[in-house]
Image (cartoon, grey):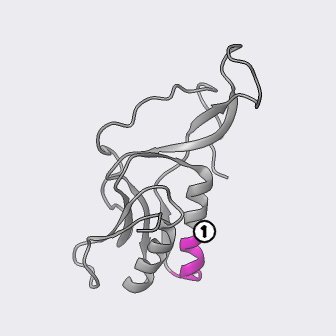
């Protein structure tokens, strides 16, 4: 699983997820991208599952970029513990994702293959996503939406 090598603080405050993505909202590397349409805490397990779905479907072709990294620790108290006695220990890691954030990018593959790979990845994620195509790339339109749950 993805997690940082070291941190300034062991436990973070929860924070808020208001507004749209300021950084990471533009396609910088590939020709195809998967963009978040809703805010969420995306866990390291969800990111890894989506990455594996994309790489498996591409069959070692093309180039892949993962644009989100889980750098926020989420704490949990042990089961059946009374209230109080401080904050729990770090349990898992999440990436704070805001609407408009580019999650994954692909290049060097067929447009149909890229769209199918991103569709499979979107099923692994807890939010609605949009498939984007870079301007000037021959292929399909840039406004094809997918959802992780049954639509």
In this view, the residue in front, 116 or 30, is: 116
Q: Which image quarter: residue 52? A: bottom right
Residue 125: percent from left, percent from top: 50, 59
Q: Is residue 10 left or right of residue 57?
A: right
Q: Is mark 1 on a helix, strand or loop?
A: helix
- Where 26 sits versus 40, above or below? below
What is the magenta segment's predominant secondary structure?
helix
Q: Which residue does the image show at 43% across and 71% down from the upper left? A: 106
Q: Quadrant of residue 33?
A: bottom left
Residue positioned 60% across, 35% down in the render: 73
The spot of residue 29 in percent (x, y) is 38, 64
Q: Can residue 54 be seen in this view?
A: yes
User: Which residue matches tag 1?
Assistant: 52
**Residue occupying the point 50% across, 67% down:** 123
Part of the protein shown in magenta: 53-61
- Is 130 left, or right, of 80 in this rendering? left
Magenta region includes residue 24:
no
């Amino acid at each position: 699983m993805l997690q940082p090598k070291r941190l300034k603080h062991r436990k973070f405050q929860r924070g808020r997820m208001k507004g749209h993505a300021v950084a990471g909202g533009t396609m910088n590397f590939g020709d195809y991208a998967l963009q978040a349409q809703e805010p969420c805490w995306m866990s390291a397990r969800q990111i890894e599952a989506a990455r594996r779905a994309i790489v498996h479907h591409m069959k070692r072709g093309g180039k892949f970029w993962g644009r989100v990294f889980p750098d926020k620790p989420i704490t949990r108290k042990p089961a059946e513990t009374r209230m109080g006695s401080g904050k729990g220990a770090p349990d898992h890691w999440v990436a704070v994702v805001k609407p408009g954030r580019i999650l994954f990018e692909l290049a060097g593959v067929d447009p149909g293959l890229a769209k199918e790979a991103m569709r499979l990845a979107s099923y692994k994620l807890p939010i609605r996503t949009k498939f984007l195509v870079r301007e000037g790339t021959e292929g399909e339109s840039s406004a094809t939406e997918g959802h992780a749950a049954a639509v």
